[in-house]
Image (cartoon, coloured by chain):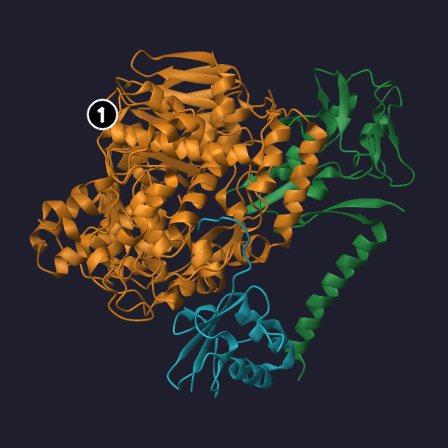
Chain colours: A orange, B green, C cyan
Amino acid sequence: MGGWQGQILRVNLTKGTFKKEKLNPKLARAYIGGRGLGTKILTDEINPKVDPLSPNNKLIMATGPLTGTNASTGGRYMVITKSPLTGAIACSNSGGYMGAEIKFCGYDLIIFEGRAKTPVYLWLNNDKVEIRPADKVWGKTTHETEDRLKAETHEEAHVCSIGPAGEKLALTACVMNDKHRAAGRSGVGAVMGSKNLKAVVVKGSQSVKVARPKEFMAACLAVVNKLKESPVTSGGLPKYGTPILVNVINAHGFLPTRNFQQDQFEGADKLSGETIADTILIKNKGCFACTIACARVSEVKEGKYKGAGEGPEYESDWALGIATGVSDLGAVTKANYLCNELGMDTIEAGVSVATAMELFEKGYIPQSDVGRPLHFGDADALVWLVEEMGNRRGFGELAAQGGYRVAEKYGHPELFMGVKKQAFPAYDGRGAQGMALGYATSNRGACHLRGYTISVEVFGIPKKMDPFSTEGKAEVSKLFQDVTAFVDSVGMCLFTTFGIGAEDIFPMLEHATGGGYTLEECLKIGERIWNLERLFNMNAGFSGKDDTLPPRILHEGISEGPAKGMVGKLPEMLPEYYKLRGWDPAGVPSKAKLKELALA
Amino acid sequence: MAKVLVIHPERCTACRACELACSMKHYGEFNPSRSRIQVNIFLEEAVYIPTTCTQCDQAWCAKICPTNAIVRDQATMAYKVLDDKCVGCKMCVLACPFGSIVLFPEKGKAEKCDHCLSIDGDPECVKFCTPKALEYLDEDTEVRMRQMATALKLKETFKEVTV
Amino acid sequence: MPLVTFLGDVRKAAGRSRIDVQAKTVGQLLAAIGETIGPGFARVLSTGVTLQPDVEVLVNGRNIEFLEMLETPLRPTDQITVFYSGVRGFPGG
């Protein structure tokens, strides 16, 4: 067995005990690792109807067989659980160094069960496993937590933790690692908080081995060199980072502004990758084994939003800035730093603020409830509210639950811009039909990563498709969803696919594990994972009815700009998508399909 | 021609691929704690500095070794450890002020960066460094590079101050 | 006159973020840009007959691939955007 360590750590927080288990090789072979393997184990072990914040939910931190190797970007890990935000499967991915360090301690996966009586953290140091009291860091930001826990354990340990937001069970809460990296979406931080699990601290010096070292390194070097040739992975991303997308998507006319009321933003260039590179950028940085290095190490040097950290990334920039109508880069960056320190998903937090702003401007939220005016474009209000949310105080107590709960409380759930109670990311599906379909069908609620059709609709990979057209979108969405599930399972970052494809990734998986994989099988495994997630959701109570979009997206045309008048043409794409997936018209996987995927 | 493993810390992105490549090349496994090059990450200051053996001209480790197990390759001028002569006394570890040579307990031998001479003379870390923070250059090329870099800075200054 | 905006590294290659140019079609526009900024930059964008690979041109937010390519007619108030795509694979961002 190469790639995998062959060992799982199971931690019972209720009893304060742990158990080391052997990784089932058949399971590993069929689901690979990361998203696939973690989701399989979780869905086998929990009741789909479980209350996500109860001790009966489980939280899994899952690495892939390529995590901790020279596979380019081979450092990723997943945080997998049942989401308290959506009630569906949650699977959040993060970079930094955490995933690799878990492998260097000898584990493929860590499973957390139950609930500790008082706040604890897990300390892993090679074979040593300790559940230690976390009372001294409970209440502290993720940054202070990391500093203090490293002082207690090892100065070069790696830490993932929740901030006050997760401790207070905020549905916008995320799990931060290495200070600036986030397993962001779906409220996974709240699940950790519900278990009184403050942090995981890891330091290891064990090896990751591969089945065929020579062939593996040759495949890795080929990928490294191919990524060097791609202008995006070797030029655009390291130089400008993901915020390069701001001006591009704005030019296309589907950059959702002011809670999706407009789709071009007059302040876009002020928040763009170009402007960030010229102003607050200190340098770029990479995650473990990453040859792209797109992270933005940044600093706001002067003014009331002074601060330093990493970011903002495109999604953060958009959610905290453009969605809220705030064009002050200093304020948006400060809000981003606050999200990292307090432990909140920037997308969910930003859209919650934007939702509250629209409701406020329409008179649905009285100012007395908020404590101050909450207008679009108000930079001070943005920074103030994000801080309130991270601490769940005042109006932030509700806003920290995400835009859906805010809109619902004030009688207008239709003004929440998202799917399955999870906020939309930075592309309006009315202008990019493939994204409309992707948002509606993503297993974890609205998500751009699950099936990133912007690739074809803006960049032309592998071919150009008209963003306004629905033709062919069902087929390309399914393909992207399956491939992405595969990539999410090996332990690599999706951004490699800006320069390479599944056909370049699978040789590394094969030489690492010696599993006898073929490219076709890898794509099939992606499809298997997708259907597995779907089954879980259905058993949790979801149906085809939930594969939908808000009324604004389905019925209100984009107000102006290049995509003026466009609506999300979901009804034209969904039936064909179900058919291609081998699901019935209600979106239920057929018995034949499940058998084909060895899920029945 | 002497070769130099040139480190440009300002280009380093802290990905640590070099640590993995090194441990794989020498031990057939991925393990940063077994790497002869280490990336020292100062996260708050955003400074990342890879360090490894600098192949001293009058190396402390070679001088102190009682069995003459540390020898210099006359072509590249890099030092390597001869396993069959090394007795694992650790005098070299004590002598090196930089921590560039260590004893690996399982083998009982001293180990240090030798520019991959013990294998093929093609430093693996350099191959995997995408931002070119690590380069393996002829000594005179490396020196020339620094002279040109300095000259370029002077050129810009002169352009600014002269009319 | 049609306003042209350059994004990302196209700005670096052009030495500026925007330019106003007289032109009746996209092809003429690229030629006129070349005359103003220089033949080196013109070659970055187009071979004269086709766009260089990985160069995208939008007219009012619509990729010229869905209009009439270099023959796409231009009106005085049109907004043109030029950026690099250069991606291969199945990304997410």
Q: Quadrant of residue A402?
A: top left
Residue A377: where, in percent of width, then height? 25, 63
Instruction: Name the side, left or right, on which A567 lies relative to A454.
Output: left
Q: Quadrant of residue B119?
A: top right
Secondary structure under badge 1? Answer: loop
Q: Position of residue A532 (x, y in %)?
A: 37, 29
Residue A272, compared with residue B124, is above or below; it is below
Q: Position of residue A81 (x, y in %)?
A: 33, 29
Give the residue drawn at x 49%, y 44%.
A494
Which quarter shows the C terminus of chain A? top left
Question: Closer to the camera, A432 or A496?
Answer: A432
Q: Is residue A156 visible?
A: no
Q: Is residue A447 above or below residue A276?
A: above
In the foreground, A281 or A466: A466
Q: Residue at x 43, y 58 (%)?
A: A457
Judge whether A196 appears above or below A464 on screen.
Answer: above
List the single residue furthest toward the right: B74
Report whether A155 appears left or right of A122. Answer: right
Which one is nearer the viewer's eye here, A557 or A260? A557
The residue identified by callout 1 is: A49
Residue A594 rendering spot, x and y as whole percentages: 38, 28
Image quadrant for the N terminus of chain A? top right
User: Is residue A579 visible in the rendered structure shown here?
Assistant: yes
> Total label count?
1
Mark 1 chain: A
What amino acid is found at the position of numbered circle 1 in the picture?
Lys
How packed mark 1 is, by other alpha carbons closer than 10 Å (few <14, some 14-19, many 20 or more), is: some
Q: Residue at x 30, y 47 (%)?
A: A574
